[in-house]
Amino acid sequence: MYIRENLRWRVIWKYAWRSVLLFTLYSLFMCFLYAKVGLRFIAIPWQPVATLGIAVSFYIGFKNNGSYDRFWEGRQLWGGIVNASRTWAIKALEFVTSVVDAPNVSAPAASASELSHRHRQLVYRHIAWCNALRIQLRRQPELWDEQVAPFLDPEESAIMRGKQNPAAHLVRQQAAELRILREERGLLNDFQHVSMIETLEQLYNLQGGCERIKNTPFPRQYAFFSYVFVWIFISLLPLGLLGEFSKLGPSHVWLTVPFSVLVSWVFNTIEVVGHTSENPFDNLMNDVPMTALCRSIEIDLREMLGETDLPSRLEPIEDILY
């Protein structure tokens, strides 16, 4: 996610120079045919071109609204993951404290070391879930050993890595752990167990929302025809401007080039902005900063455990927070 208030000119130029060069060459070629070769018939009336431009602007505006909605929903889902993560850690630390009133459980009272182990296991597995979900959405399985495995037991990590949907199975494992804490260890009463299961259900809903965005592409009929219509307009734009500028004098026809390039760049940029916002989980410049959010979750949860040797928060790289 680009976090600087204003885009740097080098960033704008990086993504614009190819299209600007193409628009310039095309406009120069049309002006050359009109002014030097004498092909006056290539000029077309401005009114239909202007009408097409208005229609295209409405169409790409509609598409961009839909694209932004997908990005914003993705950001809201990850905001929910941040909040649910803190809730999970609080419940794990405050509910799993000592033997509760469980008449069917004959287990001895839990020691301080066992409670610490249980707390760490529940919290660390959740951190692993956050990272597993992120690398699933970005389709980066090669990061498992570095960013997920350290929070799991080696055996559990190996099992989860072989699953089709590791994040879903990690939540399932959390539920199994809660059952053991309630039925075998007596560390949760029924109310606490239900409350923590509800938090797991919330995590599943948030994960499902992310998967829905990732696995459902932006409707191609909108994306494709927006691209086609923009380029049809860009192709006709210099032809419509030729006649208008020629009315000012023979030499003014070359003003078609700068004005055509400027308008073409504006329309193309609007189209590109919408296109790059369609998939908010692709680890691009304008996507949801899931890596930074996972790191924030890790810091908050490990600090709740009382740890002090914590990683630092991620800083933007060239104004981009990943």
Image (cartoon, rainbow, N blue to C red):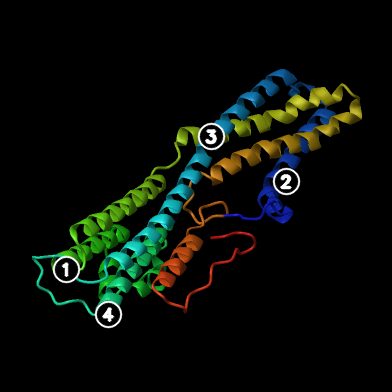
Quarter-wise, where is residue 140 in the image?
A: bottom left
Q: Residues within 10 Å of mark 2 (few under 14, many from 20)?
A: few
Residue under label 2: 21
Cβ atoms at labels 4 and 3 below 8 Å apart: no
Label 2, secondary structure: give it. Answer: helix
Instruction: State the mark number for residue 112.
Output: 4
Q: Could you tell me which residue is drawn at 44 percent across and 53 percent down?
A: 78
- Residue 206 appears in view: yes
Residue under label 1: 186
Q: Could you tell me which residue is drawn at 42 percent across and 51 percent down?
A: 80
Cβ atoms at labels 2 and 4 below 8 Å apart: no
Q: CA distance from mark 1 to mark 4?
A: 15 Å
Cβ atoms at labels 1 and 2 below 8 Å apart: no
Looking at the figure, which quarter contains the N terminus? bottom right
Q: CA distance from mark 4 to mark 3?
A: 57 Å
- The amino acid sitting under disc 3 is Lys
Judged from this view, the residue extending furthest toward the front is 101
Report x, y in % for residue 152.
32, 72
